[in-house]
Amino acid sequence: MSLRLVHTFGRNAGAAFAPAGDVVRFGRAPDNDVVFDAEYDRDASGYHAELRRAGDAWVLVDLGSRNGTFLCGRRVAREAISNGDEIGFGGKGPRVRVEIARATGAVAPVPPAATIVEAPAHVAAAAPRAPAGPLPMAPPAGARVGQRTLAMMISHAVAAASGRRRHRTEEIEAMVDAGVKAAVAPHRRATRVLGVWLFVALAGLVALVVWSRRSDDDIATLRGELANLPPGDPRRKEIEGRLGTLHPANASFGRNLYDRSRKGIFMLAVRDEGFCTAFAVRPNVLATNAHCIYAARRTGGAVTALENEGRGQVGFAVTDMRPHPAYRDGDASLITPDVGIVTIAGKVAVTLELATKQELQAAGVGDDVYLIGFPGTLMDRQNPAATFLAAHIGRLTAANGRPAAFTEGWLVQHDAPTTHGTSGSPLFNGRGKVIAINAGGYVEESDEHIGGKKAEVARESPYKFGMRVDLLDAVLR
């Protein structure tokens, strides 16, 4: 009698297998006789079920599977099978059709149900373990068997199957374990080395961050001390020497500053033409120059604040404008607090951080400063894109250009190559905080001969100035 198994559902659907032994094991474990796909046929257990020869019959036995064994759609624990039956391994798992035939090709009869006596579970569990080997000779088909004979057959079948499975399983597990250990040994060494290098790199990074912060703090402290010393104090040289050895290290500072500030920079436009820069100090308040506010009033028309890099699609209507009360418009020879604010209808995505009083006091000549604004020749209402500039503080003076105490020394001279469109641009310190609002430039006069005649010529100076940002306190509520 021959047995042929045809896969009807699952990863192996269409394949056929003709086992030769008296026990056929099914499952996803690799040492089964019929191995299901471990990933695709997941309803099947590792050791799911067995077909056991019982004389001229085959018996299907579930091996305690997780999802159950089904015979022609019925869940069974142990049952004889017939030619053409379909076995399912789990409710939605793989299925196998059984074909039983004699050597002559005739289909083998299935023994009557009365001859297949199912032993209770306690009988099989209590049966003595017999040595692995061939099953004892089964009685002829149709013959009645006693309880002792049946128990002996079950005992031999269980002992043979479980003993063989345990031996093969242990052997395969040992081989797999040895192979895995050999394969991962080099990776373990590499992982340890990589872990050491990673630890060293992280420690270095932490040390660099700590050093950089301490360096920044030391610079701010020394600058504050220097600002409070009189010009002739001998300690100034010592502090200036120490400042020369401290440098905040951040090669990407400018890029990082622009990236985090760009959505807080705005182009002010009237009638589709840009005229000044502004920046957000509150979600609905922008800072700019007082002379920009007066220019907008003279021009007339609705004023719009267009977000930097917003492609002209992100903009806010200006609902109110307020210049500094001490600003005097119309007198170019007189420098007055040239700051103001505009209120917008809506809320911006980013607000810029203003320097504290202590940080403003620590600012000094030679400091690096940065400016982001819209140069007049590059202003584009359809594509507002700001320009980033780096510069230095040239002088800190009062409005008359002379050194003064902190309360009066709000004029910040710098050397950034700005134009009229950058009026209202924020001026950042080395920590990315706004210390001033760019306002304009000096005018230099010189005598020149034009057409043989002496003439006085006025030219714009390369030196620009900004208004210290705390002047906004007079207009911010």
Image (cartoon, helix red, strand yellow):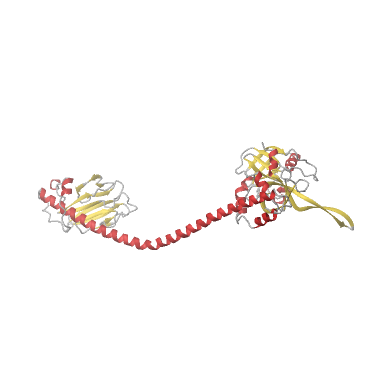
Image coordinates of residue 104 in percent, x first then y, are 16, 58
Q: Farthest front residue?
A: 234
Q: Nearer the viewer, residue 215 or 238?
A: 238
Can residue 107 be seen here? The reply is no
Q: Residue at x 67, y 56 (%)?
A: 238
Residue 302 coordinates in the image, percent (x, y): 70, 39
**Residue 44 left/right relative to 142:** right
* Image quadrant in which the N terminus is located: bottom left
Name the residue at the right extreme. 453
Tell me where residue 234 sits by quadrant.
bottom right
Q: In which quarter of the image is residue 172?
A: bottom left
The image shows residue 135 at horizontal and vertical percentages of 15, 56
Residue 424 located left or right of residue 29: right
Number of numbered discs overlaid on the protein picture: 0
Residue that appears at 25% across and 59% down: 168
Residue 127 is at least partly visible in this image: yes
Residue 214 x, y percent position in the rendering: 59, 52
Quadrant of the frame with the C terminus: top right
In front: 229, or 197? 229
Front residue of this view, candidates 179 and 383: 179
Residue name at image x 53 percent, y 54 percent: 206
